[in-house]
Amino acid sequence: MLRRIASRGTPAQREAALATLATDQTLRLARATHQLLDLGARRPPLTLPERAKQRTIYDAGHQETLPGRTVRAEGSRAGKDVEVNEAYDGLGATFDFFAVVYDRNSIDDEGMHLDATVHYGRRYDNAFWNGRQMVFGDGDGDLFNRFTISLDVIGHELTHGVTGDEAKLVYLGQAGALNESISDVFGSLVKQHAQKQTVGQADWLIGAGLFTSRVNGVALRSMKAPGSAFDDPVLGRDEQPATMAGYVHTTMDNGGVHTNSGIPNHAFYVAAMAFGGYAWEKAGRIWYETLRDRRLRQTSTFRQFAVLTAQNAAQLFGASGRKTVAAAWKEVGIEVGR
Amino acid sequence: MHIDFRIDGGLAVFPGLAKPVSIDCAALPAKDAARLGELVRKADFFGVPQPPAAAPMPDARAYTIAIDDGLQCRTLTFAEPIAEASMRELVAELRLRAGTIRRGGGTR
């Protein structure tokens, strides 16, 4: 009826009818949104998701302009460029991990295309997620190899995309260190899943293989033993703390996000070791549900995050699960209470 | 001309790489000093507006450059990716030069 008026009535009638329709539509949307939110942290996709990877790899040609020239699209065969192939395979392994283990359809759970640029800059020794895509440098060749070399680094970067879609933890202070830690946790799990490693077989390192043989170090970080990854005359010493007693207060690195992440990293490691088996099945599941938990705030502290992991552990694995997670946080100096 | 250059952030923290590097152009070979001077001029380092503060991007770096050319002195911080091509070129050059200095002037 209103729709008929909207299409056939006088201009004034049309305007009124359209306004009513718009309000009605807004209320409908609000109701539907409310229903969706009431289902809990899980957000059902609006359409049936197709679990299909859509990867595109670009080559920046040693410039710093993004994204660069398309060099490999989904389904095309591997070429000769190692970086291109590693990026392509790494994006695939990360997509598969989240799809198979947590039923997640890409970074945004809505099938987001996965884009990555390799050969970014001259002797560029970094990799980052710019909110839309991954960016990899070739490394300087002196201290760093190519940044596509470690699958956990690729998983780390894409997990920044997942966090940006879910908890949106601010990249500062404790929330920033949690953001970093979540990327290390799932980056490591992507590698463990791809290699079918149990908690005992995993190396719990982030970025193994990234250093050249000239560096005195094994990786960027160690979740098993934070602070032990490198000690080198040029790079300096790994200063990650494993417990709250060593928490570093600094204005650098957005308040030490890559330093203090050692604390939640180690808590995850301790919990995963206590659960045993494959880390993605219990500890990983608890951390993933916490990342999606509506109660997790963008400015969450370590303790607030820890309390939610304990609650999710209880929900998923009962009292013993909760006890295991609480004990892991206690080991790094964080009490989650009863 | 004197340049102080500092790199902050990145995929991991390396205390050795986070230390500021000082470049005294008078001590450089004339060709290198001229090239740096040209990059600073092209980037309009003393004329560009202060880059706006933006929410930090995960694992991206911020570069702080302080330049004293004898007449004026200015400090700017840029978070990557840097929009202006000429400023990107200056930062890329300083990054490579900082790497050389950290390695003790040559290869390790």
Image (spheres, rainbow, N blue to C red):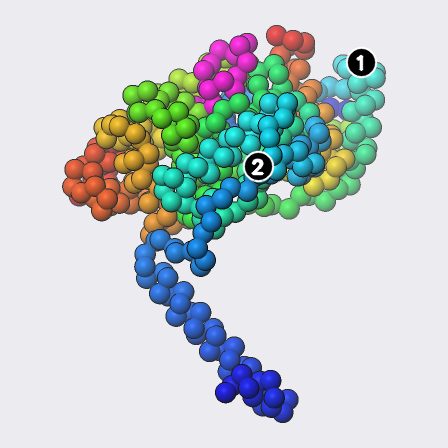
Label 2 resides on the chain identified as A
Q: Position of residue A4 (x, y in %)?
A: 55, 86
Q: Main secondary structure of the magenta part?
A: loop
In the rendered view, would you say A19 is above or below A259? below
The amino acid type of the residue labelled 2 equals: Gly
The residue wearing badge 2 is: A75
Residue in front for this viewpoint, B2 or A279: A279
- Residue A211 magenta: yes
Q: Residue at x 68, y 21 (%)?
A: B96
Q: Residue at x 49, y 48 (%)?
A: A111
- Quadrant of residue A46 in the image? bottom left
Q: Position of residue A183 (x, y in %)?
A: 43, 35
The residue at the far top in this view is B108
Q: Residue at x 44, y 55 (%)?
A: A48
Label 1 resides on the chain identified as B
The amino acid type of the residue labelled 1 equals: Pro
Q: The residue tagged with tag 1: helix, strand or loop?
A: loop
- Residue A213 magenta: yes
The residue wearing badge 1 is: B29
In this rendering, the label closer to the viewer, 1 or 2: 2
Q: CA distance from mark 1 to mark 2?
A: 51 Å
Q: Position of residue A231 (x, y in %)?
A: 46, 14
Range covered by the magenta-colored residues: A207-223
In the rendered view, would you say A11 is above or below A30? below
**Left or right, B88 with reference to B20:** right
Q: Position of residue B5 (x, y in %)?
A: 65, 26
Q: Are marks 1 and 2 in contact (CB under 8 Å)?
A: no
Q: How many marks?
A: 2
**Left or right, A92 with reference to A141:** left
**Left or right, A201 with reference to A232:** left
- Quadrant of residue A244 in the image? top left
